[in-house]
Image: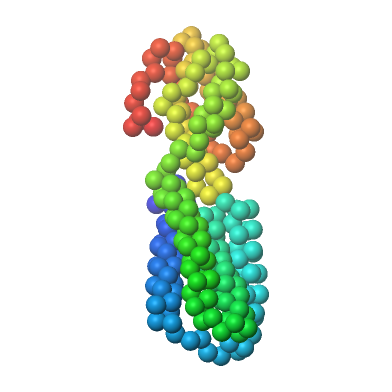
């Protein structure tokens, strides 16, 4: 009862914290690779390491694909970020396995860090993108200009009863989208007619945009105040 708007912000917050943790792991991996490269440390137990890598790679592949598929289906930014965690394990394991295989036949121990560094940089890039998405949701970034254009197109179909929109705001949390705006309506409409018009427009927007919550405030034509902090 004391969280009337739900707990959607918890998910992008968890995703941001996880992205920070993953980025820390990426930086440590880069540091380890550079240390190995500079110190020319030999790699031991290649055959045993390759066997363990094959088993762990299979598990990481399953978890990465399952989390990524579920994250896309639900729009969960925290699941997509979690999939990066396992993707980091997967790509690192594949890189190390390839390096071990080459070292086994060439004896070039420097291949271990050389192969792993590009993998770490790739995971770091994905992590930055996931972190940015989490920040956008936490900061209620507008969805896209195209969404407003679609709303304005719906309103235009109800001219001359409705003549335009202002104070338009939008945000996204996962797959849920939230829209709110002021609707300019004819001055001589009754309260009941205005309510029916709002319901028709909101219904059409939901049918066209899918999973979206719409809040409309009606203003008489020529009397809409640009008070963006009121709604």
Please state the horizontal and vertical placement of residue 167, each as a whole percent of the image: 41, 27
In which quadrant of the rendered view does residue 69 lie? bottom right
Q: Residue at x 57, y 69 (%)?
A: 91
Q: Is residue 12 visible?
A: no
Q: Residue at x 54, y 23 (%)?
A: 152
Q: Residue at x 51, y 86 (%)?
A: 43
Please state the horizontal and vertical placement of residue 48, each as a whole percent of the image: 60, 89
Numbered-mark total: 0
Q: Residue at x 64, y 69 (%)?
A: 61
In which quadrant of the rendered view does residue 198 lie? top right
The one nearer the camera, 202 or 152, is: 152
- The colouring scheme, among rainbow, by chain, secondary structure or one colour, is rainbow
Please state the horizontal and vertical placement of residue 137, each as a whole percent of the image: 45, 47
Q: Is residue 120 visible?
A: yes
Please state the horizontal and vertical placement of residue 201, each as a whole percent of the image: 58, 25
The one nearer the camera, 74 or 116, is: 116
Q: Residue furthest top?
A: 188
- The C terminus: image quadrant: top left
The one nearer the camera, 108 or 22, is: 108
Judge whether 114 appears above or below 203 on screen: below
């Amino acid at each position: 009862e004391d969280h009337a708007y739900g707990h959607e912000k918890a998910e992008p917050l968890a995703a941001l914290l996880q992205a920070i943790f993953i980025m820390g792991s990426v930086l440590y991996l880069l540091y380890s690779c550079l240390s190995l490269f500079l110190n020319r440390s030999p790699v031991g137990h290649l055959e045993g390491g390759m066997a363990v890598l094959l088993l762990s790679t299979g598990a990481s592949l399953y978890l990465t694909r399952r989390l990524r598929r579920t994250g896309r289906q639900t729009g969960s930014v925290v699941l997509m970020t979690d999939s990066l965690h396992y993707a980091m394990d997967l790509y690192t394991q594949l890189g190390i396995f390839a390096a071990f295989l080459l070292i086994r036949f060439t004896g070039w121990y420097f291949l271990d860090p050389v192969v792993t560094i590009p993998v770490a940089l790739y995971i770091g890039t994905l992590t930055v993108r996931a972190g940015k998405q989490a920040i956008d949701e936490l900061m209620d970034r507008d969805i896209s200009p195209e969404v407003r254009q679609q709303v304005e197109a719906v309103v235009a179909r109800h001219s001359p009863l409705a003549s335009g929109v202002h104070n338009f705001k939008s945000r996204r949390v996962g797959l849920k989208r939230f829209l709110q705006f002021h609707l300019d309506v004819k001055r001589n409409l009754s309260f009941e007619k205005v309510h029916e018009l709002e319901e028709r427009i909101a219904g059409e927007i939901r049918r066209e945009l899918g999973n979206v919550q719409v809040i409309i405030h009606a203003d008489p034509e020529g009397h809409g105040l640009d008070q963006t902090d009121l709604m």
